[in-house]
Amino acid sequence: MTTQAVGAPRLGTFGRYTLPLAALAVLVVLAFAVGRFPVTLGDLFAATLGKLLGSDRQVPATVETVIYQVRGPRVMAALVVGAALATAGAAYQGMFRNPLVSPDILGVSSGAALGAALAIFLSWDLVGIQALAFIGGLLAVGMVYAVGASLRGRDPLLTLILAGVVIGTLLGSCVSLLKYLADPYNQLPAITFWLLGSLAAASPADLKVVVPTVVLGLVPLVLLRWRMNLMTLPDDEARALGVDTRRLRLAVICAATLITAASVAVSGIIGWIGLLVPHAARMLVGPGFARMLPMTMILGAGFMLAVDTLARTVATLEVPPGVLTAVLGTPLFLWLLAKSRRAW
């Protein structure tokens, strides 16, 4: 990849962000309206105006419960998780100069999966599962970075990726061991269900923890968005331009890992978003990270919300979102590869 790749986007200024934002707004309204308990647009707007402006128009208490207690937290969680995973994927791909890198590459998902599986195996409650998943994701990246730092004299990027693959495989085998030892009637289904991903249990209490954590991880990425473009250059050239590549890489990895671990702790393992969405954003606005960052967040939030809405409405039983992201992500990714003709 070269700096020339930070080229002109294909869309005009108006359509570049307005159209995706409009599509996201439509998806939000649709997510509130459809489901086993349908909500009319009139009730939805009346409830929203009543909450925001204190409107006198009354809506049934059941509708308010569905909007504020059931679908509201779930819609918000889908938006936050989708935006976070997609942003982490964009940051990892830019940092490792590799379009096939995703948040899974440094073992975040494997560490979170092991933490959640261990908590379920120990019969911890939901808060304990999410806490241990979060800690597991951070510890996994810490292990990967420690291994990479101990193997000096080699390509640091390649070493980190290989260390991530090795540590992720090791942690995955630990998850398999816990599934083998788990109670086949209670613990094993719970572990399997968590690994498939779901937002069904998202609650306002979860959002109070996840949203600040994700924002905390996004702040460094926003502040470093211009320097991120220089990381597409070889390290020697980036250092010649005054960039401390080691510190910048560590800061970006920590920020991306933080938002990934926070998201996975709530949603479980949901793949493809961190791999697929950055490619779509890059196709729309070019590879410049300053332009990609907001577009990636919009597309990631929309994709996750669309998948979650499909997951709870497409069949009688809820389909795990992790399955749908794989089913939808495979053809979409192949289509993006076929359409993208510019250098990455």
Image: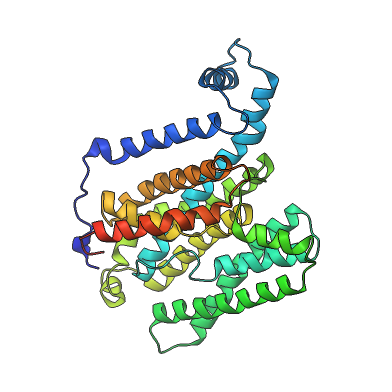
Position of 145 relative to 23 (above/below): below
The residue that appears at 69% across and 20% down in the rendered structure is: 61
For the point 43% across and 53% down, the residue is 328
If the image is split into quadrants, where does the C terminus sit? bottom left
Where residue 16 sits in the image (x, y, percent)?
A: 28, 41
Seen as rendered, the residue at the extreme front is 316
Name the colouring of the figure. Answer: rainbow
Which residue appears at 26% of the width and 37% of the height?
15
Above or below, 287 against 108 in this view is above
User: Taking 310 as reference, is 121 left or right?
Assistant: right
- The location of residue 223, given as percent across then percent down, is 40, 53
Residue 244 seen? no
Number of disc labels:
0
Above or below, 147 relative to 293: below
Q: Position of residue 24 (x, y in %)?
A: 42, 37
Determine which quarter of the picture holds residue 234. bottom left
Seen at 46% across and 56% down, the residue is: 327
Outermost residue to the bottom: 153
